[in-house]
Amino acid sequence: MWLACRFLYDMKRRLIFLFLALMPCAFVAEGRPYVNDKKAPEDRKDIEVIQSALQSALPQARAATVCIELKEGSGSGVIVSADGLVLTAAHVSIGVNKKVIVILEDGTRHDARTLGLVAGSDAAMLRITDEGEFPFVEIDRENSARLGDWVFSLGHSGGFDKERGSVVRLGRLVRIANNTLQSDCILIGGDSGGPLFDLTGKLVGIHSRVGQQLQVNMHVPMSEFLGNWDGMMNGEFIGEGPFAEKPVKGSGFLGLATDARKEGGLRVTKVGNKSPAQQAGVKEGDVLLTLNGTPLETRAQMQELLKEMAAGDEVTFELERKGKRETLTFELGER
Amino acid sequence: MNAKRLIFIIACVLALPLHGQQNLESAYRTTGPAVTAVFEPQRAVLQTSSAVILGGRKEMSYGIVISADGHILTKASELEGLDKISVTVDRTNYKDVRILATDPQWDVALIKIDATDLLPVVYAATSEVPHGTWVVANGATSRTTRRALAGIVSAKVREIPAAGGAALGVVLNVKGKLLEIEEIADGSGAQQAGLEKGDVILTIEGTEIKKIEDIAEVLKDRKAGSTVKVTYRRGKREFTAEVRLTSKGELFNDTMNRNDMMSGDYSKRRSGFPRVMQHDILGSSRVTGGPLLDLEGRCIGMNIARANRAESFAIPVEDLKALAERLMKQVAGPPPETE
């Protein structure tokens, strides 16, 4: 039986061969470094195995680690597919279907839009909307991380810094609970949403929160993402707090007054000072023709449409200004 | 400062159901004794070739032994205000400590103890090692025994510009077309150069100064630690002084941001370095000043600042060697003239 395993194995890994021979086959298939199964590294060779595994996984891991820029600040995330699916934390993305900017390690900026999130466990997804092939990492789908495993974290600590790059930290998994991993890779603000990897470079967690002590650094395990995958892909806001607050319907605010026109559309009679509408460039005299594709006929009808939306939701108006058609897209303010 | 807010990790551990949890005993965590035991060869180097700087009986910072007869490099700003400085190397405590020279730009001091037969560090060939390379530094210490903590090289070698930019360290009052010094910041270059309240600034680096914007223009591309020539008027006389620029953040104690608040203690001087390497060794600000070792036990840098809970800076070995040579030369004075 162990011969079969041996053939699966790359001859370059002779270093860990002897030990593998003693291990059940399940471990061999995963490429799990033997040091993870020692309570502590015992000699120079053990720590060099950790170092070389980390260093071979690092380039791809770093290429896939991104900074996420929002209006409210910045966090981190990690790309998990060539077409630009990004995993991050719910307290970074905050809501669904929001525009954000994703910054790659080399400083390239891409438009992206948030997908769904799990408010109770701090898991979230977003997608880069620019076309392209992006560097990505594999997810640990087998839930193979064990207590004491060596892991490394990446993240844009304190925000994006091209001269510095994302910051790598090494540590061990020090606590495993059903919906949380704890490591002693030290995290700080800006790391939120960034990736935690095992020594084979597979993604095992997403940075969530820290305690006062340096040793308390918490991550969302992959099982939370995999268990809510379809809902998040569909843009669902799953569960209630504490990591993201569900938007309240009817809380949105445009900041303008209108009068219905006989021939259809609503003429803007007043634009509130510093209102979302004013900041987006809506002017008195503009005629609003459609809201998110729905033709506008009466004030009551527009209010009905807005009642179903929340502060922070995006609205697109098609409007007529001095005989010309224009389109304006902006977010509703907080009432 | 970036006005934008960072997304902060919620800084308290929320009550989450922890049933079925498993815990790794602290001895086996990255800083635990069972793990650090494997770094005994590097710890042995810290034992003989790092120095503990004490203020009274308290360990304040560390140093690097660079000569057998007791020359030590350490973090200069950690020496400020220290009472009863003594230095421990290996098991011996040396009471007679002289500060020979300091380099304000790198925040490094050369000090001397009366010792013989010390084991100076051996420098590594280069600081250009791949990210993820193990490094070892001083952890806490007992009176007789140094402890080692290990981490990895974690980001690119780079400059850390002075927080808030470089400044003379004065608050000016506009009096007609004159700029008069109203206040002088403690520890500023202006104070050290002998400027006083009431002095009128005339020129900086030859540029006439008529308004506050003129100063900003002259200083904008200059670095903390460098010096500028300032002419000023006191009473009816004019004077010239070489004023060292200091980082604004350091002088006026920039307000703590949320990352600082969650960092525990950090180095007071943590910016304005021409070049640093970054590592992730966990420790307090008290472990700065000592050597950063590679797995061969060679000195690859000098721990110069704990910037925050996740980022520590070290002076790369190339710069450290050049700095050590420069300070030693400065202390030796010009070579005696031969006849």
Image (tube, rainbow, N blue to C red):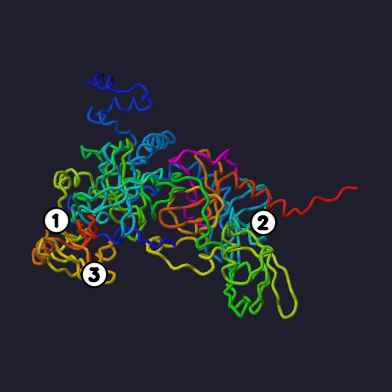
User: Callout 2: 10 Å neighbours few (<14), some, many (20+)?
Assistant: many
Magenta region: B121-150
Magenta highlight on residue A72: no
Chain where mark 3 sits: A
Q: Which residue is mark 2?
A: B112
* Element type at mark 3: strand
Q: Residue A26 lies in what quarter of the image?
A: top left
Identity of the amino acid at label 1?
Gly
Q: Are marks 2 and 3 in contact (CB under 8 Å)?
A: no
Residue A145 in sight here: yes
- Against A260, residue B197 (above or below) is below
Looking at the rendered structure, the kind of residue marked 3 is Val
- Give the residue at mark 3: A271
Residue A195 x/y as whole percent: 31, 46
Q: Chain of mark 2?
A: B
> Residue at image x 24%, y 19%?
A4
Name the quarter where the N terminus of chain B is drawn.
Answer: bottom left
Q: Which residue is mark 1?
A: A239
Of A72 and B147, the residue lying toward us: A72
Residue A43 or residue A77, whichever sits in front: A77
Task: Identify residue type, mark 2.
Answer: Lys
B182 or A271, which is in the foreground? A271
Asked whether the viewer can see residue B34, the reply is: no
Mark 1 or mark 3: name the one nearer the start of the chain.
1
